[in-house]
Amino acid sequence: MKVSVIGASGKVGSSAAFCLAEEYSLRELVLVSREESLDKIKGEAMDMYDALAAKDVHVDIKSTSNLEDLTGSNIIVLTSGIARKEGMSRMDLAIPNAKIVAKYAKAVAKYAPDSILLVVSNPVDVMTHVALKASGMDKNRVIGLGNHLDSLRLKTFIARHFNINVSEVRSRVIGEHGANMVLLLSSTSIGGILLKYFSNYHDFDMGNIIEKVKSAGEEVIIRKGATEFGPAYAISNIVTTILNDQKRILTVSAYLDGEIEGVKGVCLGVPAKVGTEGIEEIIPIKMSDYEIKAFLKAADVVKSLTDNVFKATDI
């Protein structure tokens, strides 16, 4: 299998590339950057080879600024864009990043039209829609990182609160990757038991937990300058799920056409069965009245921003 990472000179791109290089299902990994960053990604490749030798893993790593080298890719990970800085919301990035994403999405459609495009650039729900429109690819083959990382963060906070192994937690965040994310508390369980049936459930402060999830990325940025390991492993989760046709249900950003609460014409984080064909099914779900209301609000907010971005950029 061949995977290409566009924006491999950035922190998220390079970390994701290294996570992917460790996967035994990969035959070829292509690191793509702008011409001015070519030496940097060549250095990244050299460093990766040294690390992989210690694990007896072999993968061919190519460093390039030529978009024609995307040809033959099974999956393309798009991480390019202006980096989010302290105090900057994901929405502040929308218009400049839309132009960058559209440019690369068109290149993907030209050189690797049968690939699956995983969009990481923020604001990811809007950028997923931009990539879908600019590329003209089928909606099941354009996927956003969405709320997958948010859901992993949520599981961690719940596991810590209840002092339980994180693998026992089943929960997810849907909606916007941002201020309007929705915690699906009504279906959250630990070890197959609904959360509300735990004796210490009354100590669980949902509002506080969701605020921690919302601010987790910002807090990392304040403390170390950028998020990298969390997004990198979340990206690797999705890519390996596709490569190995695992058909896992992941919360990714997908184009909706009425599958959940009748929402149409917007990309949002939703539970989806992911496999070798990309998004193979968006999973219809039942939610509490509160969750439905919050999800519909997220849809309105993201759709409004997306419409404004399309008007401002003429994509």
Image (cartoon, grey):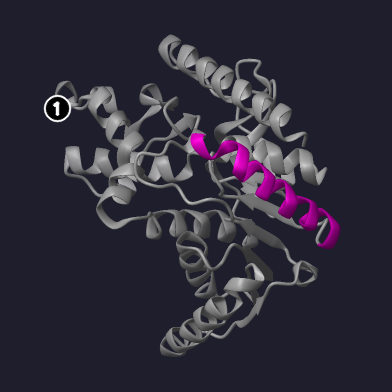
As for residue 110 lying within the magenta part, the answer is: yes
- For label 1, count other residues whose C-alpha is less than 10 Å away and answer few (under 14), some (14-19) or many (20+): few
- Seen from the viewer's position, the closer of residues 240 and 215 is 215
Q: Is residue 207 above or below residue 94?
A: above
Q: For residue 313, which quarter of the picture?
A: top right
Snapshot quadrant of residue 241: bottom right
**Looking at the rendering, in which quadrant would you find the N terminus?**
bottom right
Q: Which residue is mark 1?
A: 200
Which region of the structure is painted magenta?
A: 92-111
Q: Relative to residue 315, is residue 199 depicted above or below?
A: above
Percent x, y of residue 158: 26, 38
Disc 1 marks a residue whose amino acid type is Asn
Closer to the camera, 95 or 52? 95
- The vertical placement of 185 against 34, above or below, is above
Q: Is residue 38 left or right of residue 184?
A: right
Q: Position of residue 149 (x, y in %)?
A: 43, 46
Q: Is residue 49 magenta?
A: no
Q: Nearer the viewer, residue 64 or 263?
A: 64
Q: Position of residue 311 (x, y in %)?
A: 72, 27
Residue 175 placement, left or right of 223? right
Instruction: Give the residue displayed 50% in from the left and 30% down from the top.
Output: 176
Magenta residues: mostly which secondary structure? helix
Tell me if I can see residue 266 in this picture: no
The residue shown at (55%, 20%) is 301
Q: Residue at image x 72%, y 63%?
A: 74
